[in-house]
Image (cartoon, rainbow, N blue to C red):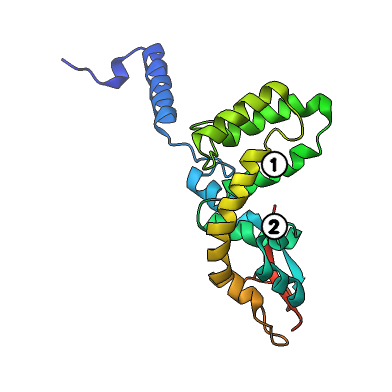
Amino acid sequence: MCKGLAALPATCLKSAKDIKHKIGFLLQKPDPPKEQKSLKEKEKEKEKAKVTVVNRVPLAEIEKWKTSFNNLIKNEDGRKAFTSFLQSEYSQENIEFWEACEDFKQTSVDKMNVKARKIFERYVEADSPSEVNLDSATRELTRKNLEMCDASCFEEAQSKIFTLMEKDSYRRFLKSKLFLELSQPLLDNKPCSLEKKGKRHISDRSQCLPSYA
């Protein structure tokens, strides 16, 4: 027959209280730290962070981009605008590879082997993280070039990707909303639709485009 809690020794009551306290502590759901964010939130912030600066581009410069793909890709602002377009098509690996090849040509001889291997493993090798669209023959040629690495190591592969962008993505870029907006003269005090919110207005002889971090 139960005699109630009063009949239990003091030590038992203390132990019971301790157990109750521990169980209550374990059942409490701790608040997640403020710094902890979901993967989706982090990805969204990354995308927002890409557009960091609004550059001014003279209309005359933009007109040159229409005349040839080479004029576009050799111009820093042109590459930024083209990269923005490729990102919208999820094919930015092409321009990234082209830029990596340009940078590779300026690499000192003692660092070429390491950098060449990194470029190959990221863009050229089959099933690589940012694999570009190359035929098997060019892929194999580039692999062999790594054995006698020099500034021309990626020459053939870079040329193929340049031609691919010129005949495909560049033509769509010239018809894209992004380029058409950049090509239109802006009225005084009228903000460009690509201009980041909160930035000041741009004059009628300039255009704006996003700059990527």
Residue 171 in which image quadrant? bottom right
In the picture provided, is 8 more to the left or to the right than 40? left
In the picture provided, is 81 more to the left or to the right than 41? right
Front residue of 119/136: it is: 136
In the picture provided, is 22 more to the left or to the right than 154? left
Front residue of 31/154: it is: 154
Taking 186 as reference, is 124 above or below it?
above
Q: Residue at image x 76%, y 41%?
A: 103
Instruction: Say which amino acid is labelled 2.
Output: Ile
Point out the residue furthest to the left here: 1
Disc 2 crowd, CA 10 A, few/some/many (<14, 14-19, 20+): many
Disc 1 crowd, CA 10 A, few/some/many (<14, 14-19, 20+): some
Instruction: Say which amino acid is labelled 1.
Output: Ala
Tag 1 near tag 2, CB within 8 Å = no
Labelled disc at residue 100: 1
Q: Indicate the secondary structure of the residue bearing disc 1.
A: helix
Labelled disc at residue 162: none
Count the numbered circles shown.
Answer: 2
Label 1 – label 2 distance at C-alpha: 13 Å
> Where residue 149 sits: x, y (%)?
73, 26
Front residue of 101/6: it is: 101
Is residue 148 among the parts visible in the rendering?
yes
Q: Quadrant of the N terminus?
A: top left
> Where residue 94 sits: x, y (%)?
59, 47
> Where residue 63 sits: x, y (%)?
70, 74
Task: Please give the residue where the numbered disc 2 appears in the rendered image.
Answer: 73
Q: Residue at image x 58%, y 69%?
A: 174
Residue 36 in which image quadrant? top right
N-term mark: 1 or 2: 2
> Where residue 176 sits: x, y (%)?
54, 69
Residue 186 in which image quadrant? bottom right
Is residue 45 among the parts visible in the rendering?
no
